[in-house]
């Protein structure tokens, strides 16, 4: 599979995940009140699902230009690292701003898993930035796929919590 096919697949999965998130949000909003826990999970999932798709589509456009791909891959990886650091900080701040009751609905193990996946993805991008272009491209693609797997995990958590009635939706 060449890079264009890989990026197209990532973009399609990303858009599909974002679409299903919107459907879940509509069903959750059909109830009387959406809690802070459900809002945090939904916002995180939307951001997590949109960014790899945006990066993949942008990279497809940039790689089609008649310029050297090495700086494009490196700049994209650097931007992805900045995004990952920003989203991690946002998630941490959002958790701190929740009430204790809402915070208890969040499983700390899931937070740890999300943090580990994010830190691993950052590590992959750093390895890619310090390596050859072929390894850098592979690390960027692997990082985006790992990020989408994280999105699928959060999507599953949202669905399960809605079914159990513990999503902060009353």
Image (spheres, rainbow, N blue to C red):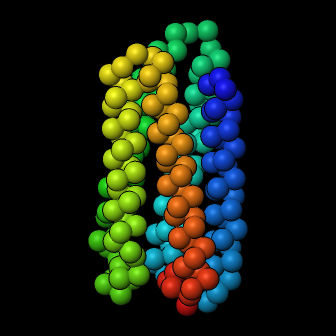
Q: Position of residue 29 (x, y in %)?
A: 64, 79
- Place residue 133 in its image quadrant: top left
- Place residue 129 in its image quadrant: top left
The front one of 101 and 138 is 138
On screen, residue 121 versus residue 27, left or right, reads: left
Q: In which quadrant is the C terminus drawn?
A: bottom right
Q: Which residue is depicted at the point 66% across and 71% down?
A: 24
Residue at the outermost front position: 1
Q: Position of residue 48 (x, y in %)?
A: 51, 53
Q: Which residue is depicted at the point 29% across and 71% down?
A: 96
Q: Position of residue 101 (x, y in %)?
A: 36, 87
One can see residue 77 in this view:
yes
Q: Position of residue 81 (x, y in %)?
A: 38, 38
On screen, residue 94 versus residue 63, left or right, reads: left
Q: In which quadrant is the N terminus drawn?
A: top right
The front one of 78 and 128 is 128
Rendered view: 114 above or below 58 = below
Q: Which residue is depicted at the point 35% across and 69% down?
A: 109
Count of labels in the image = 0
One can see residue 94 in this view:
no
- Place residue 151 in its image quadrant: bottom right
The front one of 93 and 10 is 10
Q: Which residue is depicted at the point 65% across and 17% down?
A: 64
On screen, residue 151 versus residue 61, left or right, reads: left
Rendered view: 106 above or below 31 = above
The front one of 99 and 154 is 154
């Amino acid at each position: 599979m060449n890079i264009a096919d890989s990026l197209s697949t990532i973009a399609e999965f990303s858009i599909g995940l974002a679409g299903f998130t919107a459907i879940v949000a509509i069903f959750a909003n059909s109830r009387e009140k959406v809690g802070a826990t459900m809002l945090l999970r939904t916002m995180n999932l939307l951001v997590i699902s949109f960014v790899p798709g945006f990066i993949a589509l942008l990279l497809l456009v940039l790689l089609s230009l008649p310029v050297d791909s090495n700086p494009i891959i490196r700049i994209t990886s650097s931007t992805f690292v900045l995004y990952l650091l920003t989203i991690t900080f946002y998630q941490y701040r959002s958790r701190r701003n929740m009430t204790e009751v809402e915070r208890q609905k969040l499983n700390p193990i899931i937070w740890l898993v999300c943090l580990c996946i994010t830190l691993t993805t950052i590590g992959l991008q750093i390895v890619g930035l310090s390596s050859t272009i072929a390894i850098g491209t592979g690390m960027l693609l692997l990082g985006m796929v790992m990020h989408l797997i994280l999105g699928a995990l959060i999507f599953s958590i949202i669905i399960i919590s809605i079914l159990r009635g513990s999503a902060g939706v009353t």
